[in-house]
Image: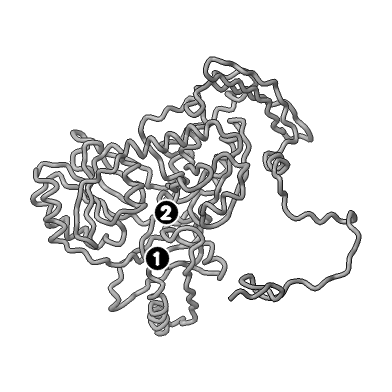
Amino acid sequence: FPDSLLCDAGGVMDALQRSCATCADSRKDFYILGDTSYGSCCVDEVAAEHVGADCIIHFGPSCLTQTSRLPVLYVFGREPVDTGHCASCFRQLFPSPKAHVLVMYDTVYSHCADGLSEELSKEYKNLVVSSLMLPQVLQKKQTTLEDVHLTGMGLHGGYSTDASEASTHSEELKRKDGEFHRFGRYFRLSSPADVGLGEYQIFYIGSEGLALSSLMLSYNRNQFYSYNPETKSSRKEMTSINKALGRRYFLVQKAKEARTVGILVGTLGAANFMEVIKRLKEVIKLAGKRYYTFAMGKLNPAKLANFMEIDVFVLVACPQNSLLDSKEFHKPVITPFELEMACIRGLVWKGNYVTDYRELLPGGPYHHPLEREASECGEIEPEFSFINGGLIHFATSDETKSSGNTERQVSITCTYTCKGAVVRKTNTELTSWSPAGSYMQSRSWKGLEQRLGECEPQKAVQGRSGIAAGYSHEQNHY
């Protein structure tokens, strides 16, 4: 349950228990998962496995990210929508009946898609209404998810547990004859031979949030319009996509100059998250950088501020939660796509933006093979730094092999050219150097030190008593 629906969790569980009491096998245990480990839009497989669950019922909005272990029943709910008013706003935004419009919606408004399509399809011949494509489980399990009937509760959901056709990068990435499967949504263009996806305008039903932001960045060549059922207002989205992409491109430049990268694990239930973490480690190594891996649950600036030796963080999460606004953070937080743009040489950003990390894996539309030959010893062409306004030269080499294992040592030559002056640093061979340890040595306070054997033992003395507002030995001024 998301935080907004926790007040209904007890009643829903009682209804489920009463419904299952009439079954032949009535010995079923239900648990309420209230505090999600990461984002409320994701299926919390971690908490479910702590209680040995066989399946999960996910209530509320969802990012429709593919799970890896447990079958899931999705109950999105039925948020109220005035279909007539929505259609009226649609006609005002698109007065021409020949307009090519693609309709998308938040998961909680999926129940209104059929009604809206019936009302507008007769008038708009080039109207395309997307449909939800529920994710499948990658692993086959012996347990199956039984039908759950919630009578009189007005709930809407569906599920899919057939994993026979699931692949590493999921069927969401297939495109054939104008068909698109992406972000848990499926649609087929009416005339793909004549009009491409870039010429469609997108009408989104839902409130402003991460779901809309993810779609706008991924489909940044399309003009977006939105209708908010809560306020019954419609508008043309005037948010500058170019400005948002410019901000992300700035973060890519920051990542290019980073020497130490922190990999933030933002999910433990999404499919293929371990594969993308493994790939990110290889990308970072080939770029001559060092990395640390962190698993710390929900992120906030205070948590990441404890690791000031990290130059940039990369967040592995679902498409919605990966777009973290890091303005309040001390160090930038980027996506796996942005890290690859910064570390893989030869990649050129052509305007496409990827928020789903599975599209970067082998078989995905944006997968780029890693060329290890490029990291052989030798001078690499310098790159211009948009941050410092100078040139940066890097050279890497693999030098040592011991105990049958290849141990990577990096010899880095850095040359900074700034304002016409060139300062060349001597080669430094990094053998057993740790960025965290080096940063700790530069701190004035390094934490509590036990100093065992250095101090004489002393008798215990009476300490302070009371509270911070006024200890017993302090004079009472109140």
Q: Are there few (<14), some (14-19), or many (20+) residues within 10 Å of tag 1?
A: many
Q: What percent of the width, then of the height, locates residue 280?
A: 55, 40
At x 38%, y 59%, the residue is: 62
At mark 2, the secondary structure is: loop
Q: Nearer the viewer, residue 81 or 168?
A: 81
Quadrant position of the N terminus in the picture: bottom left
Residue 476 versus residue 142 in the image, above or below: below
Against 163, residue 444 (above or below) is: above
Asked if labels 1 and 2 touch by Cβ distance under 8 angstroms, the answer is no
Residue 100 relative to residue 75: left or right: left
Q: Residues within 10 Å of mark 2 (few under 14, many from 20)?
A: many
Q: Which mark is residue 65?
A: 2
Q: Quadrant of the C terminus?
A: bottom right
Image coordinates of residue 307 in percent, x first then y, are 61, 47
Q: Which residue is mark 1?
A: 73
Q: Is residue 386 left or right of residue 82?
A: right
Q: Amino acid at mark 1?
A: Leu
Residue sitting at 51 percent across and 54 percent down? 300
Pinpoint residue 227: horizontal percent, then vertical percent: 21, 54
Q: Is residue 146 left or right of residue 224?
A: right
Q: Position of residue 2 (x, y in %)?
A: 41, 66
Q: Which mark is residue 150?
A: none
Closer to the eye: label 2 or 1:
2
Is residue 77 positioned above or below 264 on the image? Answer: below
Q: Amino acid at mark 2?
A: Thr
Task: Looking at the image, tell me whether mark 2 or mark 1 is earlier in sequence order.
Answer: 2
